[in-house]
Amino acid sequence: MESGKRIKIAQLLKSEPGISTLVKGWVRTKRGNKNVAFVALNDGSTVNNIQIVFDMTRFTEEQLKPVTTGACIAVEGTLTASPGGGQSVEILAEQLLVYGTADADTYPLQKKGHSMEFLREIGHLRPRTNTFGCVFRIRHAMAFAIHKFFNDKGFFYLHTPIVTASDAEGAGAMFQVTTLDLNNIPRDENNKIDYTQDFFGRASNLTVSGQLEGELGAMALGEIYTFGPTFRAENSNTPRHLAEFWMIEPEMAFYEIKDNMDLAEEFIKYLVKYAIDNCSDDLKFLNDMFDKELLERLQSVVETDFVRLSYTEGVEILMNSGVKFEFPVYWGADLQSEHERYLVEKHFKRPVILTDYPKEIKAFYMKQNEDGKTVRAMDVLFPKIGEIIGGSQREESLEKLEARIQEMGMEKDGMWWYLDTRRFGTAPHSGFGLGFERLLLFVTGMSNIRDVIPFPRTPKNAEF
């Protein structure tokens, strides 16, 4: 056994019959009679199984008894043309090796059609299902495409810190990182926690964004991007929130807001087209099983110009729509998903880029417009998702940035390093953030963000 080299199933299904092969994988199904047994085998390289044919004149029932759903096996045989429907080739088995059995009474994935809720409860096994195999292969493809897009455009990949003392979003919902003894916390003369005794000598947290550090890189390297994990300690159990998720955040020197919008549209179209061109089998499975409009929706994004309009124009459309929204719409309101999706799905029927938001509902670092009321923010809104990208032109004026920090009641002392970028050689620059899991929700058609990340971190859930 194992005299040859293993060939992956994805490659075998494209091969010409007649070759001898060694295949390894996990059993999906087994059926047959006293004369012949058929085993559907999958090795994770493709959503498609390869059929293994066991001629029972060459194998005993005892040999095939441990070959049950979930078992891991190796088979040597000959690739032959398949006379049956559903596959062009199959393997006529000559030798069998069982690596690991799976007890039919206790293996949780014996039958098809498990609910997403059930599969989340067995997160250590759910990658073995067709659905999650598709999702995670697409996740890989999108990660690769992100790096390829930026590399081909001359951007530099910058690793920003996971542990930080800054809060880029000003939201405060951060996970604290400490080595202090929680059973004997040191305190100063004012009975406050004495962080000078902590590992970093100050209060530190897991990052919510790599943007601020990314700006430092852009002020030296010109065009950079970050791609890494970010963390939010929000006690939220919605289908759109995770405590740990991945963000892509490009920052570009000398980009005005229009350049920023152009890049965001080009970027997301590139990713969707890459998925269509390179993940066709996985997308077809998800289209057929979960979302019959998925492929059509993906294609429409690639072929359609995004609508660009101001926040003020968007609010006017919403207020004149005649729709009774759950959250009231007025100028100055932070638009909710229902508002964003109305603009995209009902009014324009295409992706929308909203710009020039009221400064009161946006972050301190966004460039202020001359009207004194709005900032050069941009949000890219997608069907079924709402906001998928958020970004802005950054405020390059030291005076305006300091005034905004003071206006928002932020601590200026901790931002000295960020302000230095405006103090020494400031330049117009822009950037945006794409939530990786939100992109994957759109590309896969999944409805819950917990189903597009291998090991979701949510409140009361960090088991594996």
Image (cartoon, rainbow, N blue to C red):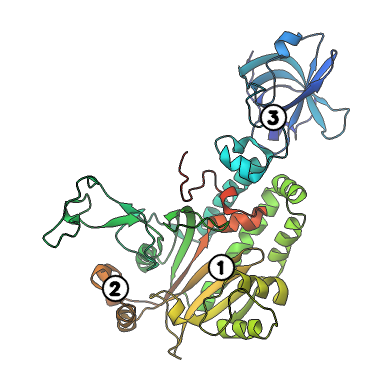
Is residue 137 shown to the viewer in this render?
Answer: no
Q: Residues within 10 Å of mark 1 (few under 14, many from 20)?
A: many
Secondary element under disc 2, as helix, strand or loop, is: helix
In the image: residue 176, left or right of residue 380? left
Query: Which residue is found at the position 28% from the left and 69% from the top?
Result: 415
x then y, percent, for residue 11: 70, 34
Tell me where residue 324 sits by quadrant.
Answer: bottom right
Tell me where residue 43 sits by quadrant.
Answer: top right
**Separation of residues labelled 1 and 2 (CA atoms):** 26 Å
Residue 219 image label? none
Q: Residues within 10 Å of mark 3 (few under 14, many from 20)?
A: some
Secondary element under disc 1, as helix, strand or loop, is: helix
The one nearer the camera, 425 or 411, is: 411
Residue type pointed to by label 2: Leu
Query: Which residue is found at the position 84% from the left and 17% from the top?
Result: 33
Please give the residue where the numbered disc 1 appears in the rendered image: 264
Please give the residue where the numbered disc 2 appears in the rendered image: 419
x then y, percent, for residue 100: 60, 19
Q: Earlier in the sequence, mark 3 or mark 2?
A: 3
Please give the residue where the numbered disc 3 appears in the rendered image: 110
x then y, percent, for residue 403: 31, 83
